[in-house]
Amino acid sequence: MADAKEAIRELRSNRGYVKASITRLCGSCTDSDIEAMLLPNLKVKLTKLESLFTEYEGFSKKLFFLSDSSDDEDYSVVEGKYFSVMAKLQDAIEKKNVPAKHDDSYDAESCSRTKLPTIQMSCFQDTYTARAYQMERDDNMEPKVKDFIEFLEKRALAMENAEPTTSKSSKVVVNVAAQKTSANACLYCKSTTHKLFNCKSFKLLSALERFNFSKAQSLCQVCLNKHNGKCKFHFKCDQCKQPHNSLIHYDKTVPPVSLLSGEQANSNILLPTAQVKLLTKDKKVTLARAILDTGSQASLVTDSLIKRLGLAPTPKNTNIIGVGNSKNCAKYSIPLEIQSTTSSYRMTINFHVVQQITCKLPQNEIDISKLKIPEGVVLADKDYYVPSSIDLLMGADIFFQILLPSQPEVELQSNNLVNTKLGYIIGGTILQQKAPDNKVTLFCSTCNNNINDEIKNFFEVEKVPQAYCEKLSEHDLAEDIFQKSVKLNNNKFQVDIPLKVPISEVNSHLGNSFDLALHRFLSLEKRLHKNPLLLTEYEKFIQEYVELGHGQYIDFQTYDLEQDPVYFLPHHAVVNEFSKTTRTRVVFDASMKTNLKVSLNDLMLNGSLPQKELFDIILLYRIGDFTFSTDIQKMFRNVLVNPEHASLQNILWRSHPSDTIQCIRLNTVTYGMKSSSFLATRCLLELTNRYGTDYPLASFILNNCTYIDDILYSTSDKLELLEAKAQLEAILQKGGFRTHKSILSYIARFYDPMGFVSPIIVKAKVILQRLWLDKLDWNAVPPAAVKEEWLRFAADLFAMDPICFNRNIPVPKSAEAVQLIGFADASTSTGYGCCVYLRVVDKTGKVNIALLCSKSRINSHSKPLTIPRLELNAALLLTHLIKRTHDTLSLKLKINNVYLFTDSMIVLGWLNTEIINLQAYVANRVKIIKEVSSQYQWQYISTKENPADLISRGMDPQEIASCSLWWHGPSFLQNGKYEFSENSLNLPTVTLPELKKVPPSGDQLVTLSTQVFFFVSR
């Protein structure tokens, strides 16, 4: 008895320790924490939480059998926390697995801002210049003198940086009148509204298909037009820098593959091959030749075979790593059913699509007169000795699956004869054969999504965008499907699920989802019946779902699982103890893989959210004395799904294990699916498109103050606030949406989209960078010095004083001046950053200054930059940030002036220098700064007074709350009579680095005046 009590006490102690670990881990996984975590951290926490809960369950089970008392309530609490946090982590991992911008990215348009391509120097002829100008100008607008001058400046800069050429361009006489009609028509779709390089249908083709089309049409590889003689344009590909158009660039090389390699005198190495049967789209049988590679982790298929079969692969990016760490990217995958040519054996394999696997094998025809195949042996490839193309590569996993248990081997002049389910295969060395001149090495491939490639971008210096970026994203395709399918009947939207393949082909791509969904449901059912309270809430949720018409019970026999597009969604509970509306929410999982290793989310297009980012919404929310906040009730579930697509949204359910399992089809947009947020928010935008003129205030709120289903609005006019509320309710009713009657309270969280604590965050980034530079494994213990530094930082973070500041920044209508003030700074030890303030001066001279936002970057250690270059990058970062801030606040305020400060005289000197006199790195950035900040004034400030200096060197957590310089800017701005200098760039003479020699000014004048005269005279 005493031993039993001792065992129970020990189990309770161990379980208590594990429970405490789970509680601590869950406590560190709040919404704000998860949002700020990097993907590797999320995965580590997910694995750790699963491990801890498994331990907890083990101890609880043992206690259940040893103890008479029940700990069901304690177990339920821990289980509830576990499932809640697990759901959050899985959802965050799924979101962050999609390639996206870095969290510090603030400008969605910055990536589309590109520099001009390098143009080679050529003979300066009128025809050449005129054609280049016509390519750049907007045909819908009359040219202005400033357009001519801007064009000439761009071309002059490009020609100065281009490599000179010694070849002379030949004259080409073109009959413009005769070619005018054909030149304006698209050569692919024959439309007269655009040219080939702007054709959406042409861009939908793969790069290789576009290249083949240009060859078949005898198009110029540079301008993609038809003409005689040498092309007058000197564009270079953005990816390989070769003289061809970026639209027709494709990777011509195939990474090496690993099975065998070796040389022997007077010998030839035979690689094992097999012939297999496949079905085309029309269910006709075709033969393909496969090679079996025990050194490959992936199975591959050529693009030419897929086209021959007439099948559509699924977009899926996978890195293929070969010998020497060579890398290729397979952009598609497809499941194929193969059948043996020697038996009825068949199997389904998921292949990655590549352009080419290897050359023809064998390389030379083999003399088989001296080879004796034993009687009764049926070869998988009867033509193994004849060189022919390879269509498929079967990896190691397939190879060992098809080996028969008995493997009779017959020594045949150093050949091995191996029995498989596809027939006998031959592989090995053949003596007395002429060896080929080249050796073939097959794929030693691994599918690898390298986390370091993503993390590396976190620390790299912000780059100036490239000139031309080919992009036809999933967002465009999803938008096109929405516009064609959306309906609004009886105040209810109906939409199609945006799929990558036609609905009729979904079944062949998805496969069987029922078995795994059933397994997941039975596991859920066991957990629910261990927690009666959770079961009751779960049943209530499902019942409400059906009663509201958002779902309906249907007979399983309604579906033909072999033909119909059907998918069963697993589901689980997410419990939110703080929710005032729904404590328990059922979440559906459309990421579950079927037997073909494909999920419903894999087949969906990822549409973009047509809403402002959180940065802009919070920025607007700080302006105005009166506010309201609300959310839209059941926003997703108020949008109906086309009945033809609703068959992809089924769940399994029963209230008691003794009942028969039933199928519920979900009729509305369902959370847990990749496209759900896009469809629901796009419907809100559709409301403003249709009824925006009738409800202008509500339209403004939905377009600028709404994030998913949450609405934050502020104004200084109380009557306007009431009118906005009435309009919002009216326009939402047009789409069947309703807002919650009670205004929800805002709970402060440690999430910093505005950069209010950038000086603190930059220190954490530096520590993370040190771990990354040391190339430590994510699960490895960091060095003692780094660990100590992190623990000290974490302790300071928890001990820091609370930070409180007013949401509202008062801006009286009678304000004398409303100004935006920006500061930039950089340091070699840490990084660079910028911050922006709003300065309001009333008629009495009283000044109110408030921090609006900030951004930071960490210095790159792979390519260290000089201090002047870092300061220039800080100025560029500030330029983009203050432009975005100005554009957003202009929706509510009239900004009188914008002033930008830097403590670098060299940067100010560069900004006061002609771009043509600067070297390329500096010139490109100065050009962007001048263009974006042309209406702003640059000023000098000392380092001591520069608040951005706090970002560049970092700040301890306990210091920031009381730092007046950070929250209110330099003290001289508090003076209401302070006058900003008109001549902000008249600085003392300094020696500027990175200047280049320019031709004599006389030569420049002749060239420029000649060009201006030419264009004006036209």
Image (cartoon, grey):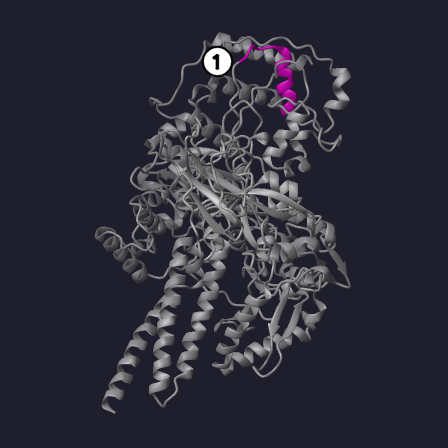
Is 129 one of the magenta-colored residues? Answer: yes
Q: Is residue 398 visible from the viewing direction of this image? A: yes
Residue 568 location, x and y as percent? 61, 65
Magenta-highlighted stretch: main secondary structure?
Answer: helix
Q: Is residue 741 visible from the viewing direction of this image? A: no
Specify the segment rendered in magenta.
122-136
| Amino acid at pointer 1 | Pro
Residue 879 location, x and y as percent? 47, 37
- Is residue 183 shown above or below 862? above
The one of 360 and 269 positioned closer to us in this rendering:
269
Residue 717 location, x and y as percent? 61, 57
The one of 980 and 348 positioned closer to us in this rendering:
348
Is 601 one of the magenta-colored residues? Answer: no
Residue hosting label 1:
164
Q: What element carries label 1?
A: loop
Dividing the image into 4 quarters, which one contains the C terminus?
Answer: top right
Q: Is residue 254 left or right of residue 346?
A: left
- Is residue 66 shown above or below 738? below
Give the total of numbered labels.
1
- At 59% from the left and 30% from the top, the residue drawn is 248
Dividing the image into 4 quarters, which one contains the N terminus?
Answer: bottom left
Q: In the displayed orientation, state which residue is furthest to the left.
A: 784
Quadrant hosting residue 779: bottom left
Residue 657 location, x and y as percent? 56, 81
Q: Residues within 10 Å of mark 1 (few under 14, many from 20)?
A: few
Q: In the displayed orientation, state which residue is furthest to the bottom.
A: 1
